[in-house]
Image (cartoon, grey):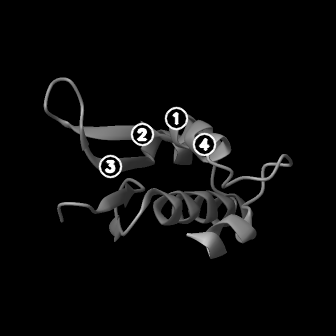
Amino acid sequence: MLNDWIFKDGSTETKCTSFPYAYRLMFNSLKKGVEQGRKYDDMVKGMVIIGPQRDAHGDLRRYSYDAATEMAKASGLLTPEGQINSREFKRR
């Protein structure tokens, strides 16, 4: 649990070993939900990634979809077109 990243999509909570895998799960869950006819905005509001690091208040860091997407872009996990960069996942 100490180094786990947790992806929450409202009703379910999934432990992941790293941010890239938690983000990929978030990305794919959103994509699948939209394909099934769920509303994008409603889904994004319920999604969060909780990191193992603590913030200034001592709480675990929480990343909204937008914050997680910015972090993914900065670390090369997304292509310029906004798709998952599978090459980057193979390196990690």
| Cα–Cα gap, marks 3 and 4 | 14 Å
Question: Residue at label 1?
Answer: 67
Count residues near mark 3 (Cα–Cα under 10 Å), then give few for <14, some for 14-19, many for 20+. Answer: many
Is mark 1 in CB contact (under 8 Å) with mark 4? yes
Q: Is residue 71 above or below residue 88?
A: above
Question: Residue at label 4?
Answer: 69
Q: Is residue 30 above or below residue 32?
A: above
- Give the amino acid at mark 2: Tyr
Asked if residue 60 lies left or right of residue 87, the reply is: left
| Cα–Cα gap, marks 1 and 2 | 5 Å
Is mark 2 in CB contact (under 8 Å) with mark 3? yes
Give the residue at x 45% y 48%: 47
Is mark 1 in CB contact (under 8 Å) with mark 2? yes
| Cα–Cα gap, marks 1 and 4 | 5 Å
Is mark 3 in CB contact (under 8 Å) with mark 1? no
Quarter of the C terminus within the rendering: bottom right
- Counting every numbered tag in the picture gives 4
Residue 63's disc is 2
Question: Residue at label 3?
Answer: 51
